[in-house]
Amino acid sequence: MAEGTVNKQRRYLLGAASAAGGVAAVATATPFFLSMFPSARARAAGAPVEVDISKVEPGMMIRAEWRSKPVWVLHRTPEMINSLSEMGARVADPQSDAPMQPDYAQNQYRSVKPEWLVLVGICTHLGCSPTDKLQTGPDSGMGEDWKGGFYCPCHGSKFDLAGRVFKDMPAPTNLEVPKYQFISETQLVIGDDGKGA
Ligand code: FES
């Protein structure tokens, strides 16, 4: 092989090695840089959120945030739970058969435990935030026979105390139930139900 050709090949190999070294440096530097901000990255990726429910008395509702969405946690009373079977004829999808939700949401309670309701607080019509109307009867402003639930002020969709949409409403489906699980009697994790993706 001519000397010029050998030198050219050497230069090429050196250049390739240093380029590969550069890639390696970037490859090792990148995870280090990213690892400096795990919580921000985890939040952006929708990391699960832990919620303390120890002080949520029956009849109370608290609000959390997950993936930048409002999440409601309602502690239902026995009366609230009983009202759900009465609502069966008035809601569009009583057993919540529509897909795209955890299997524990596919029943009249739409929850892991009947006394705890966990919902994404965004209307399934056009994304407004419904108002909680937990009071019953005429004082609720929702009519004599109102059993408690949620009302979307944008176009009037009504939902019961399981987030089930009433019949003939603009909202096409029940309110979304996120993945969640109880990690103790007083701690709830939203965004992870222990069943994988
Ligand atoms: S956005 Fe809720 S009824 Fe339209």
Image (cartoon, rainbow, N blue to C red):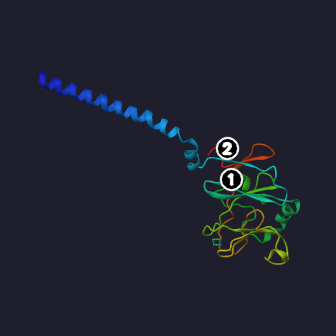
Total numbered badges shown on the rendered structure: 2
- Rendered position, 93 above or below 37: below
Discs 1, 2 touching: Cβ within 8 Å: yes
Reading the image, the residue beneath label 1 is 102
Displayed-image quarter of ligand 1: bottom right
Look at the picture and state if 67 lies above or below 128.
above
Quadrant where the image shows the N terminus: top left
Q: Position of residue 131 (x, y in %)?
A: 72, 69
Residue 73 position by quadrant: bottom right
Q: Quadrant of residue 15?
A: top left
Residue type at the position of mark 2:
Lys
Q: Residue at x 17, y 23 (%)?
A: 6
Q: Residues within 10 Å of mark 2 (few under 14, many from 20)?
A: few
Residue at image x 65%, y 76%? 155
Give the residue at mark 2: 195
| Mark 1 neighbour density, 10 Å: few (under 14) some (14–19) many (20 or more) | some
Q: In terms of image quadrants, where is residue 87?
A: bottom right
